[in-house]
Amino acid sequence: MVRFLASAAALALASPSASQAPSTGVAVHAFECGRLVQPDLGRFNDIYRFRGQRREFAAGCFLIRHPKGNLLLWDAGLNAAMAAGSPTMMLGLPIPERLRALGMTPGDVTHVGISHYHADHSGGAADFPRAELLIGRGDWEALKAMKPEERPAQNLAPWLTGGGKVTPVAADRDVFGDGLVTMLAMPGHTAGHTALLVKLSDGWLLLSGDQYHFRENRAVRGVPVFNANRADTLASHDRFEAIAANLKARVVIQHDPRDLASLPAFPAALR
C-alpha cells in the first residue's frame, strides 16, 4: 500500500496538472514594422462611420518560431523607401535588426507569409529572398499583373522575378502540416486576403491581417470603401468571428496599436 501511494505521488509530480496545457513549442514574437497616420477613418467604413476621425495605425509583424526549426515571418510592414519623406509613414526598427536581438539572421527565416499584397504588409519582404513566400492565390495573380514599378511588385520582386520559391495559397493551408500554424482564406479586402491561426500552449491566437483595422470597426462589422469585394468581406467577417468564438481565440488586430501593446514586449514571446 505504501509502495502504491509513493508511486501515485511520483506520477502526479511527473504529470502536468489539468490546468497546465502541454507546450506546443510555438513561440510568437510581435513587434511594429512602422506606423501609418490615417487622417480620416471615414474610408475604413462604407456607411460613413468614423468620418473625420484621425488615428495612428501600427504595422504589426510577427516572427513565429516552430518546434521543427522553421521560422515564419507573418507580414513585413513598411520599408525605408516607403517612409522616406512621407508625412504619414514612419519606419521603426528594421526586421533584420529585430532578428539580431534574437541571435538570428535573415537567412534563418524559412517562410514569409503575407496576409495580402498591400505595400504596408509587404514592405520588408525583400530582405528575405531565400525564404518561401506564402500568399493567397488571388493576390499572387494580382501581383503578376502589376507593372514592375508598382510598390507591391517592388516589395515582392525576389519572387516575381523567379528568384525565390513561392506557394500561392488557394484555400486554408496548414503551413507545417501539424495544425499549429494555419493560413485562413478570408477574401474581401483583397481577392487572396488571409488571416493566421496559431496554436499556443494555452489556446489559440488569431492574427487579423486586414480583416479589421481597428477595434471599433470590428464591433460594427465595418467594410472599408477600398476593399475588393463587399460581400466577400462580410462573409469573411462571419467566418473570422465564428472561428474566434468556437476556439475562444485571442484576436489581434494587426493595425491596432492597442492590440500589439497587449502582447509581450519584444523580444519576449507569446507561447
Image: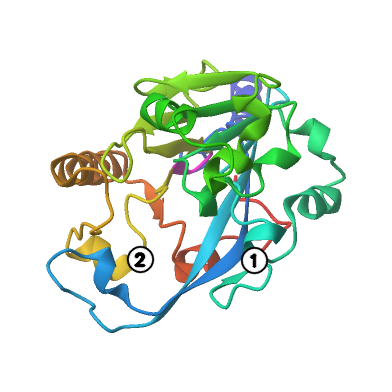
Give the colour scheme of this rendering: rainbow
Q: Is residue 262 part of the magenta span, yes or no?
A: no
Magenta stretch in the rendered image: 201-205
x 17%, y 74%: residue: 49
Query: Quick check: marks 2 and 1 in contact, CB under 8 Å?
Result: no
Q: Label 1 belongs to which residue?
A: 83
**Above-or-below relation of 211 to 140:** below
Residue 141 at x, y = what percent? 41, 25
**On residue 233, which mark appears?**
none
The amino acid pointed to by label 2 is Phe
* In-image side of 151 versus 158 (left or right): left
x 52%, y 66%: residue: 58
Residue 44 at x, y = what percent? 28, 65
The amino acid pointed to by label 1 is Ala
Q: Toward the viewer: 184 or 167?
A: 167
Q: Toward the viewer: 215 or 25?
A: 215
Residue 105 at x, y = what percent? 85, 40
Residue 25 appears anywhere in the view: no
Main secondary structure along the magenta-highlighted residues:
strand
**On residue 214, which mark appears?**
2
**Above-or-below relation of 222 to 156:** below
* In-image side of 57 versus 269 (left or right): left
Residue 213 at x, y = what percent? 36, 61
From mark 2 to mark 1, how far is it between C-alphas? 22 Å
